[in-house]
C-alpha cells in the first residue's frame, strides 16, 4: 500500500487536481509558518531585551495577524477542496468499477457481486479521511519540513544537525506502525465484505426462509460476523491510538532535545535571543507534518485498501468488443460450433463440444441436466462470455467479432432473475402493450394492482411475486418484438395454469415471426419446441 499511489492519480482526475492544489498550498503554508516564527521573535525579543518598547512591536503584531489569517485561509482551502476531491474521486472510481464489471460480464460478476457492492459503497467512503486528513500532511512533509529545516540550517547549523539526527526516528516508527495498520485494515475490509455478503444473501433469501419457517436460523451466523467486524474495527482503533501516542512522544522528545541545546547555548551567550526563539518555534514545525501524517495514516488505510481493490478491477483486461455489423436474425441461423467452456473452479467443461443450429422462425429448446452449461451457452451467444474453445456464429461471423449494439438490438433476453428497476409497471415494460400483457397473463395481474400500468414497484420487483416478475419481464420481451427471443426457464416459478399462459405466449411469439431459444427443464416447454438441443458437460480441462 503506497501512501500516494500513482495508480489512484491515474484513474481519478479529481485526485490529481487536489494533489496539485495541496502542493501549492503546502509552499504557502511553509512561507506563512516561517514568517510567523520570525515575526513573533522580532516582536517580543527586543521587548524582553529592553532594547524596544511595546509600541515598537505593533507593526510586527499587525503583520503576524495577516500571516495567521493567511494560514487559516490555506487550511480552509485544503479541507474544503479535500472533501470535494474525495467525493469526486469516490464517484469516479465507483463508475469505473461498475463499468468494468459490466464489461467483464455476468459470469465474472456472479461470484463477486456482494464484495463489489460492499467495497464500492462503505469501503470507498473511507477514502474521505485519506484526502482530508492524511494526504495534506503527507505533502506538507515534502514542503514545510524541508523549508523549515533549511531556515534552521541558515540560522544555526548545530541545531539543524540535531534536528536532522532526530527526523529519521519518526519515519521508522511510522513504517513499523503502518505495517501493523495495513494488516489490520485488510482484515477489517475482509470482515466487512464477509458480513455484507451474508446479509445480502440473507435478505435475498428471506422470503424463502420465512415460507419455510427458518427466518431465525441465520441470526447466530450474522451475529458472529458482526462481532468479528467489531473486533477488527477495535483492533484498528487500538493501533491508531497507540500510533498517535508514540509519534507524539517521539516528536515531543525530539523538540525537547533541540530546545534544551538551544537554551544552554543562549544561557552561555553562544546564541542570541531572537535566533534562539526562531529555532525553538520552527523545530516543532519540522516534526509536525511527519507526526500528523503518521497519526492520520490509520484513517486512510481502509480507504486505500478499498481503492486498491477497485483499481485491480478497473485494470482487469476486458474482452474487446467486435466491430463487424451483425446479420439480420430474421433470416439467419445461429450456429454453436464445437463450443466448450471451462467452468471456473469446478474442474469441468460445461458445455462440452456443443454443436447445434438455432434456425430462424422456430422454437429451439436447450435441454440437459443442471450444471450442463445451458445458461453458459446462452451467455456466449449474447457475447457476455468468451468461450474456451469453439464459437457461436451467425452468417459465418463469430459473435465475438460483432458490434455488440447491432447484435443486442435484435435480441430480447429474459433471465431467471430479470432486471426490474424502481418505477411503474409501464416504465419497466417500456410501453403499455395490452396484447403482450394478455398473452403472458400480466393483464390479470394489472387488474389486481391499485393503479394498473401506473402502479409503482420497487428495486428488483418488490411488490410483485416471483411469478409476477417473470410475467412482467416476458411481457417486456414480447412488446419489444425483436427477431430473437431468449428465455431462461420462463415457467420455473409458475403454477400449472400460469405455465399454460407462458406456453401460449411462446407459441404466439413464434407466430409473430420471432425465433425463440428457450432453456427448458419442464416437459411442457420441450413439447412445444420444434427442435431440442441436448447440452452436456464433461470432467477435465481443455
Image: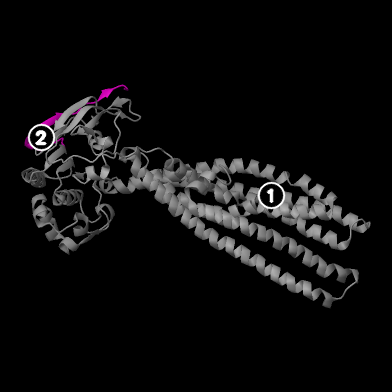
Q: Tell whether position 524 is magenta.
A: yes
Q: How many marks?
A: 2
Q: Residues within 10 Å of mark 2 (few under 14, many from 20)?
A: some
Quarter-wise, where is residue 318 in the image? top left
Return the residue at label 1: 247
Foreground pick, 503 / 72: 72
Dot 1: element: helix
Q: Residue furthest left?
A: 511
Looking at the image, residue 33 sits to the left or right of residue 206; the answer is right
Let me know if residue 220 appears in the view: no
Q: Is residue 90 above or below residue 277?
A: above
Q: Residue furthest front?
A: 324
Q: Tell whether position 530 is magenta.
A: yes
Q: Position of residue 88 (x, y in %)?
A: 47, 56
Quarter-wise, where is residue 400 in the image? top left
Which residue is depicted at the point 57% across and 61% down? 79
Q: Position of residue 58 (x, y in %)?
A: 79, 76
Q: Position of residue 281 (x, y in %)?
A: 77, 60
Foreground pick, 496 / 391: 391
Looking at the image, residue 538 sits to the left or right of residue 29; the answer is left
Return the residue at label 2: 526
Foreground pick, 301 / 352: 352
Looking at the image, residue 264 sits to the left or right of residue 128; the answer is right
Q: How is the image coloured?
A: one colour
Q: Is residue 379 above or below residue 254?
A: above
Q: Earlier in the sequence, mark 2 or mark 1?
A: 1
CB within 8 Å, label 2 to label 1 = no
CA–CA distance in space, label 2 to label 1: 72 Å
Q: Position of residue 187 (x, y in %)?
A: 51, 41
Q: Which residues are magenta?
A: 519-542
Q: Residue furthest bottom?
A: 55
Dot 2: element: helix
Amino acid at each position: 500500500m503506497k501512501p500516494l499511489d500513482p495508480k489512484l492519480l491515474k484513474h481519478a482526475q479529481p485526485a490529481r487536481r487536489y494533489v496539485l492544489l495541496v502542493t501549492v498550498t503546502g509552499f504557502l503554508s511553509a512561507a506563512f509558518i516561517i514568517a510567523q516564527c520570525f515575526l513573533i521573535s522580532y516582536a517580543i525579543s527586543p521587548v524582553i531585551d529592553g532594547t524596544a518598547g511595546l509600541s515598537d512591536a505593533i507593526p510586527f503584531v499587525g503583520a503576524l495577524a495577516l500571516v495567521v489569517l493567511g494560514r487559516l485561509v490555506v487550511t480552509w482551502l485544503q479541507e474544503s477542496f479535500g472533501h470535494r476531491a474525495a467525493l469526486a474521486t469516490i464517484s469516479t472510481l465507483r463508475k469505473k468499477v461498475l463499468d468494468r464489471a459490466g464489461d467483464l460480464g455476468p459470469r465474472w460478476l456472479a461470484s463477486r457481486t456482494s464484495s463489489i457492492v460492499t467495497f464500492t459503497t462503505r469501503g470507498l467512503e473511507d477514502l474521505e479521511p485519506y484526502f482530508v486528513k492524511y494526504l495534506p500532511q503527507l505533502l506538507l512533509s515534502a514542503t514545510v519540513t524541508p523549508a523549515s529545516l533549511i531556515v534552521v540550517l541558515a540560522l544555526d547549523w548545530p541545531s539543524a544537525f540535531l534536528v536532522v539526527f532526530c527526523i529519521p526516528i519518526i519515519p521508522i516508527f511510522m513504517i513499523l506502525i503502518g505495517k501493523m495498520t495495513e494488516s489490520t485494515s485488510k482484515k477489517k475490509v475482509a470482515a466487512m465484505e464477509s458480513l455484507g455478503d451474508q446479509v445480502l444473501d440473507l435478505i435475498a433469501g428471506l422470503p424463502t426462509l420465512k415460507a419455510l419457517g427458518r427466518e431465525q436460523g441465520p441470526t447466530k451466523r450474522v451475529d458472529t460476523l458482526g462481532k468479528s467486524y467489531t473486533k477488527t474495527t477495535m483492533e484498528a482503533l487500538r493501533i491508531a491510538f497507540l500510533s498517535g501516542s508514540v509519534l507524539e512522544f517521539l516528536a515531543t522528545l525530539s523538540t525537547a532535545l533541540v530546545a534544551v541545546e538551544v537554551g544552554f547555548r543562549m544561557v552561555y551567550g553562544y546564541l542570541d535571543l531572537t535566533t534562539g526563539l526562531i529555532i525553538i518555534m520552527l523545530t516543532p514545525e519540522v516534526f509536525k507534518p511527519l507526526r500528523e501524517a503518521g497519526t492520520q495514516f490509520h484513517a486512510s488505510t481502509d480507504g486505500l485498501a478499498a481503492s486498491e481493490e477497485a483499481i485491480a478491477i478497473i485494470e482487469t483486461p476486458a474482452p474487446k468488443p467486435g466491430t463487424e455489423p451483425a446479420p439480420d436474425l430474421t433470416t439467419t441461423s445461429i450456429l454453436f460450433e464445437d463450443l466448450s467452456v471451462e467452468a471456473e473452479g469446478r474442474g469441468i467443461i460445461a458445455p462440452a463440444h456443443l454443436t447445434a443450429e438455432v434456425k430462424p422462425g422456430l422454437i429451439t429448446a436447450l435441454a440437459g441436466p443442471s450444471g450442463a452449461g445451458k445458461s453458459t451457452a446462452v451467455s456466449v451467444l449474447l457475447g457476455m462470455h468468451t468461450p474456451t474453445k469453439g464459437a457461436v456464429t451467425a452468417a459465418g461471423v463469430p459473435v465475438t467479432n460483432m458490434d455488440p449494439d447491432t447484435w443486442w438490438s435484435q435480441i430480447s433476453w429474459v433471465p431467471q432473475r430479470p432486471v426490474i428497476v424502481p418505477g411503474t409497471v409501464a416504465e419497466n415494460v417500456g410501453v403499455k402493450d395490452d396484447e403482450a400483457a394478455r398473452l403472458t397473463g400480466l393483464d390479470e395481474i394489472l387488474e389486481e394492482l391499485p393503479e394498473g400500468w401506473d402502479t409503482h414497484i420497487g428495486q428488483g420487483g418488490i411488490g410483485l411475486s416471483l411469478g409476477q416478475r417473470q410475467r412482467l419481464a416476458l411481457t417486456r420481451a414480447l412488446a419489444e418484438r425483436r427477431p430473437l427471443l431468449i428465455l431462461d426457464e420462463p415457467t420455473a416459478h409458475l403454477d400449472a395454469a400460469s405455465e399454460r399462459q407462458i406456453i401460449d405466449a411462446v407459441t404466439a411469439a413464434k407466430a409473430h415471426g420471432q425465433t425463440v431459444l428457450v432453456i427448458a427443464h419442464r416437459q411442457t416447454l420441450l413439447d412445444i419446441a420444434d427442435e431440442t438441443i441436448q447440452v452436456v458437460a464433461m470432467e477435465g480441462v481443455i
